[in-house]
Image (spheres, coloured by chain):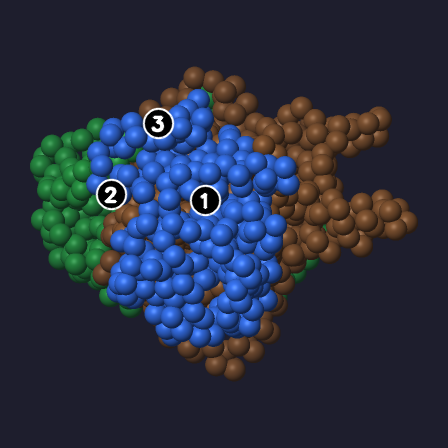
Amino acid sequence: MLRRFSVGNAPGHFGPARAWWWGVLPLGFLLLMVVAPLARLAVEALPDLQWAGISAMWQDDYLRWRVWWTVLQATLTCVAALALGLPLAWVLARFEFPGRVLALRLLMLPFVVPTLVAAIGVLALWGPRGMLSAWLGLDLQGTPWLLLYGNLFFNLCLVVRAGVEALEQVSAARVAAARSLGATPWRAFWRVQWPAILPWLVSATCLVFLYCFSGFGLALILGGQRYATVEVEIYTLVAHELRLAPAGALALGMALLTGAVAVLYAFVERRLATPGRADGVARRRPTGAWQWCAVVAALASLFLLCGAPLLAIVVRAATAGEQVWAVLLDDETLPAVWNTLRFSALAVLLATLLGVAHAFAARRSVWLRAAAFLPFVVSPVTVAFGLLLLYPRWSASLPLLIGAYALLAYPFVANALGAALDHQPAHLAQVARTLGATPRRVFWRVTVPLVLPALRRGMAFAAATALGEFAVTLFLSRPEWATLTTLIYQRLGRPGGANRDAALVLAALLMLLALLAFVLIEQAPRRARVPARGRGATNVPA
Amino acid sequence: MSLLELRGVCKTYVDAQGGQALLADGLDLLVPGGRIVAILGPSGSGKSTLLKMVAGLEPPDAGAIYFAGQDLAAVPPERRGFALMFQDFALFPHLDVVDNVAFGLVEQGLRRAVARERALQMLAVFGLHSHARQKVWRLSGGEQQRVALARALITQPRLLLLDEPFSALDAELRTRLRDEFTQRIAAAAITTVLVTHDEAEARAMAQQGFRLLQGRLLPLW
Amino acid sequence: MMFVRTLCFLAGALLTFASHANELRVLAHSSFSLPKPLIAQFEAQSGVKLSVIKAGDAGEMLNKLILTRAQPIADVVYGIDNSLIAKALAANVLDPYAGPAMQRPALVPLAPGVVAVDYGYVALNYDRAWFAKSGLALPKTLQELALPAYRNLVVVQHPATSSPGFAFLLSTIAGLGEEAAFDWWARMRTNGVKVTKGWTEAYYTEFTRNGGARPIVVSYASSPAAEVFYSKEKITESPTANLFLPGSVFRQVEGVALVKGGQQREAAGRFIEFLRSAPVQEGLQTTMWMFAAEPGTTRPEVMRHAAEPSAFYNPPADSIASKGPDWVNRWTSVVLK
């Protein structure tokens, strides 16, 4: 990260000179919404944080199992995602076949899908009355496979995308050199390509671990009694047992662990080279039956893991029958939809404000950049719990709820914008200055139009996050502010097939909303590509 | 009478490995009006920083820069009236060709429609009229650099600063563009400082040449 | 365009801040249900709109009340039962009510200032058809239930997340004694007892009556009557029945109370009176499946399928208050580790 600063952004007359006060708003926000609640949690958990308390908790077999299982399921998901994802990435990066670009675009889909929808999709496929489990005669209820499958749904695409990006920047010249020096294709892979793609894979694995470790929605619904994670345990301790001290201790422990992994992630991120290598290995059409089989197998497994749950929801919802569709007009549903929409809209507004401020403030400061990851590190359950304790007067109030939503959503805006600002070649602003533009004019005429696409992308992710927000709403919302996600959760808890189908229909609606928000805000990416800095010195023909 | 004068300029810069390197150590330069002056030096020796100092984008550590007798220390880049060109063309990707060329005119206060008119005329002079409404990345490298020159010349700059303008182009194109640029610059009679690592190119274009060596300029021709 | 849209949302959002005057907020657990005509009648008579906020299980509901006590989310709360009342009083979230409903005696007591509305019994239910088919004899004591003959036949709810689950745990402790009770639970664990999060999952998913694999479930003494009431065909005998074993029955008394810091005091008072009025006391028997607390309420015919047990096993209220969380903790490590 440091290297990115030494090139290009020269100090002096260049750039909004008062960058530091952009940072006041986001830093203040982070302080109020993350740091202070964590401190409050520490205070609450103080009795359990002393040595006696910690050893007592450690002795507790039940809690030990929970922590151990949480780590285990995250690790298993990492391993599975890597083992499956790397071959998939290979196929997508090295072969040219019809539908390749579509597949790459669709890899973004799981990011946009709310966790609750994914959980329902997994249940619709593999649950007690699931489409595939009924067909295969399997009963997966009460097993860990549901949770692991759900984890893979989200995280496989992450690894595949990172893998494709990594493989695309492997230098063809180096591979050719290795081959000409006598290495077999396999050896060439191990000795040339693998070291080159390793940083990407490590960084993606860290992210996968973080998401699985601090995920809540999936674990709550798919984990069952035995295989739920520590996050679910914290929620149960607070909402059902009101045992705040052990809940606080657990939350802090989780935060420390995720913090350590996040630091590792940031460390690895620094070492990632600027993308856009000119001489990537060219893609070839598959030749021969084996290669075509590989392509088909890759696409099929991607579909099965990432596409099938969503399709299952659509199919089940579509065939559910009119009575079930009537739930959409239910007097519980319409207010819930309204709440979802308005909370998300307000949250996206606030998140955009914070994200823009943060991105501009963080241009010069490594620490501020790291701070943008803080909301990722601290799980929603921990944040919500801390806020609940710290601001009891506000505990069921709209500003706090929206603030918590925005807290979880704004890192997307900040990071997308920050990356775009980074990649903007310094020369553009410099030329604009010499053409007579003051720094302010440069900002509005050059910088802003060029980062607008990235800003919209960040906002699209923020919107998807806000729409699917679940944990915070469970903690901080008043019961009459039920959103679509809490309504789905309630319906799942009620008996009978009708309620289950109603949950499916509502999940389909939520999925539609998320997709809509994504498409509306992001739109098709324009062809404008600001040339990445690494590419300056290619021989461009006349 | 020299138009551009650097007196005792000292500067260190951050090199490719991230360490501090010496660019200028009491460097003096006198550039007469209407001349093309070339500064030679290997790639990565900080020659770009020299141009950025002249343009006002970076302050010298010590020394002064004068233009037409005026000390430029207090003058920000947007008011110096110097045009800067880079080897990566630095065309604005979010604007089409004609808006790129019109950019400086809009900054000078012209209304957008008038600026566009003038830009179209300029493009016609360069023979690029047919590309006016295209997005800049659709043009070839040579065309892009010519658009960049059009953009620079249309503002009638007092000084033109060229930072290795042809390094990104292939050999044959380089020669062609070099001749075209020399012609146009001479026609407009603009004082020019060219920074490059290619001596043949420098000799072909410039009336005066220096080599940047250990923080000083060594006159070559 | 996007900005216009978001501005509209902002406006809409702000507009909904407008306070709902004349609304009585009632916090209840998710099983709260009264006949609609009665509610409409109450709204008409008292002039306030009833806004029922269902907050999950009774324990969850109380926790929400406690967590939001600085700015209460309701004016009156229904559903706090005798296993939770001590916690509620200790957390100081209730205001005592002294109106006429409090002055009249109830069939079952709850606590001073809290008006008892209904009572019921948490007890084991079994599936008659399954037992008839299997030929297995019904167990007569809890100890028998832990024998291998009854392996994998029982489903219970987690006491932390389910109030009938908690009630059942309390009755085993009161019936068998604390140590013997946890010993029994340990043996039940090896005997394959299934644990679910809540009553709904246990009854509607795991119970053999509804397609599951477990013929014995912790439920309510009135559930067999509900089965008759809701069955599609007319039946004279309930498909399920109560299994009253010593140490497995808990008497649950539910009440309504004023929330400390709530508004609409007068309407809240009227609501409390309304809950103890004859029509409601009669009606709730077949909507919430509990027995009426008001003396002299006529019992509907279908309730004859809901036998009242001869004995129930409730630990003293102060033990529940002081030891409850520890018991749940211990149960978790004994049964679920």
Instruction: In the rendered view, tell whether residue A286 sits above or below residue A2.
Output: above
Residues beneath discs 2 and 3 located on the same chain:
yes
Q: Are marks 2 and 1 in contact (CB under 8 Å)?
A: no
- Residue wearing tag 1: B90
- Residue wearing tag 2: B108
Q: Amino acid at mark 3?
A: Leu
Q: Earlier in the sequence, mark 2 or mark 3?
A: 2
Front residue of A494 and C299: A494
Q: Amino acid at mark 1?
A: Ala
Image quadrant holding the C terminus of chain C, namely bottom right
- Residue at 63% in and 53% down: A200
Q: Chain of mark 3?
A: B
State which quadrant residue A209 falls in: bottom right
What is the spatial separation of the Cα atoms under label 2 and label 1, in whole angstroms?
Answer: 20 Å
Disc marking residue A342: none
Identify the hue of chain A: brown
- Residue at 65% in and 56% down: A199
- Residue wearing tag 3: B120
Residues beneath discs 2 and 1 located on the same chain:
yes
What is the spatial separation of the Cα atoms under label 2 and label 3, in whole angstroms?
Answer: 17 Å
Determine the secondary structure under disc 3.
helix
Decide if residue B203 is in sight here: yes
Identify the hue of chain C: green
